[in-house]
Image: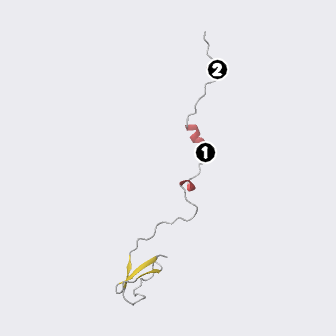
Amino acid sequence: MPTYDYECTKCGYTFEVFQKINSKPKDKCPKCGGKVRRLISGGCGLIFKGSGFYITDYKKKEQKSDKLAKEKDTPKESSPSKDNSKKDNS
């Protein structure tokens, strides 16, 4: 349920009311009984509670088949074989 701000047009008193969205707006000032108008508020920011949130917290884990496909696509460095490393100087 949101909190709404009201201001009295007669005495200038401002107050907040915690009410449902579909509730009727207040029309009388609690101090003087004058007419009130609902103020437009900026709202509140997004609040994260807890130890922290990171981009990797909700990252999809790779399946084994995806991992294998990536390994096949990447070229591996070939080490020179023992036969090719020996050269004949004849």
**Residue at the outermost bottom position:** 33
Residue ID at (53%, 54%) = 55
In this rendering, the answer to whether 86 lies above or below 72 is above
Residue ID at (60%, 41%) = 68
Q: Nearer the viewer, residue 45 or 80?
A: 45
Q: Nearer the viewer, residue 23 or 85?
A: 85
Name the image quarter holding residue 24. Answer: bottom left
In this rendering, the answer to whether 83 lies above or below 50 is above
Give how far apart the Cα atoms at labels 2 and 1 are. 35 Å
- The mark closer to the camera, 2 or 1, is 2
Task: State the image coordinates of residue 49 (x, y, percent, origin top left).
Answer: 55, 65
Give the label on residue 65, or none.
1
Question: What amino acid type is highlighted by mark number 2?
Answer: Asp
Task: State the image coordinates of residue 37 (x, y, percent, origin top left).
Answer: 37, 82
User: What residue sits right under mark 2 in the picture?
Assistant: 83
Task: State the image coordinates of residue 86 (x, y, percent, origin top left).
Answer: 63, 18
Query: Would you call the spot at circle 1 few (<14 residues within 10 Å), some (14-19), or many (20 or more)?
Result: few
Whichever of callouts 2 and 1 sits on the residue coming sooner in the sequence is 1
Per the image, label 2 sits on a secondary structure element best described as helix
Per the image, label 1 sits on a secondary structure element best described as helix
